[in-house]
Amino acid sequence: MVHPLFFSPCDWEVAHLVSILATTRPRYLYHSALAEDGAYIVERWIGKNPEESGFPYILANEFICAQLAAEMGLMVPECKVQGIGQQTWFLSSYIPHESFTYGKFKQCRNIGDVPLLLLFDLWVCNEDRWDSNLLICRPEDDPDTYEFVVIDHSHALLGDANLPYSALDINPKDCFTFNELTEQITSHADWDPALSALRGLHDEVIMDVVNALPDVARGGLDTEWLIKRLIQRREQVASLLEHARALGCFPYWV
Ligand SMILES: Nc1ncnc2c1ncn2[C@@H]1O[C@H](COP(=O)(O)OP(=O)(O)OP(=O)(O)O)[C@@H](O)[C@H]1O
Ligand SMILES: [Mg+2]
């Protein structure tokens, strides 16, 4: 068996930054594994950690939001928290993707999930939804179409603040800055499936997701407070939407 030269004796290789411009200093990481047939495979991940990013709650923000997004029915990469070397990393499985264009985005087979995405961003206080945080992919089962995959929740939930952390209460306008998304909303009925999906996230699901965050990734986070706040905010989202509408966030919502 021939091992790639870049592998040290451990299974993980922490590699280069994705981009010197990326705010949270994400890196490529490679993991060596053996397939069932004995073949040598290399998995590619994108990883972030609190020290390099400067975001003390990055592990909680990313891990919890990715799980909640998946529970709501959004497409997210496989994610995990993993100790590698001296650091604890949030890892998301590398998804091959194409550059974002509005034309491709409109062709996505999950374009109907835009209200779900907007509602999710409002719920978790995500003020960082831009084209760079939506991956445009060609689904394996139908490469003739596109699908968008949701990434990057570093700024959501507890944000980048040092203690005391954000009270999960930002101006709703800050969650709706990406016009390509907000322009898709044309009527109140557009929100109905998304509101049902969010209401369907029972307290136990929220508790399980938050409690699944490994201890090593908590960094002093009060998980009981976070669970309570997410449950409260789930109840407030419908009125926050109306507030955002009054603030002019949805130009075509009549
Ligand atoms: N799971 C993934 N699969 C493929 N590409 C990814 C993945 N996660 C991140 N990327 C790529 O890395 C870029 C930076 O990652 P991310 O958005 O999470 O960090 P960031 O610090 O917010 O960067 P930016 O400031 O550029 O938004 C993304 O725009 C995307 O191109
Ligand atoms: Mg980003």
Image (spheres, rainbow, N blue to C red):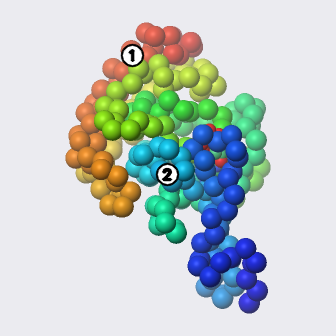
Direction from residue 41 to residue 24 in the image, left or right:
left
Residue shown at the point (73%, 83%) measured from the top left: 3
Residue 89 vertical position relative to residue 40 in the rendered view, above or below: above
SS for dot 2: helix
Closer mark to the observer between disc 2 and disc 1: 2
User: Which residue in the protein does label 1 denote?
Assistant: 242
The residue drawn where x is 45% and y is 14% is 245
The residue sitting at 50% across, 30% down in the picture is 127
Residue appearing at x 62%, y 65% in the figure:
14
Q: Position of residue 46 (x, y in %)?
A: 61, 56
Residue 55 location in percent, x, y?
Answer: 47, 43
Question: Is residue 144 visible to us here?
Answer: yes
Crowding near the residue tagged with mark 2, few <14, some 14–19, many ≥20 C-alpha atoms within 10 Å: some
**Residue 24 location in percent, x, y?**
57, 44
The numbered mark at residue 253 is none
Position of 121 relative to 47 (above/below)? above
Left or right of 44 on screen, residue 73: left
In the image, 248 versus 107, the foreground residue is 248
Residue 107 in view, yes or no: no
Q: Tell which of 220 and 209 is nearer to you.
A: 220
Q: What's the distance in space between the residues labelled 2 and 1, CA to CA? A: 38 Å
Query: Residue flagged by tag 2: what amino acid is it?
Result: Glu
Q: Earlier in the sequence, mark 2 or mark 1?
A: 2
Q: Quadrant of the N terminus?
A: bottom right
Name the amino acid, label 1: Glu
The circle drawn on residue 51 is 2
Element marked by disc 1: helix
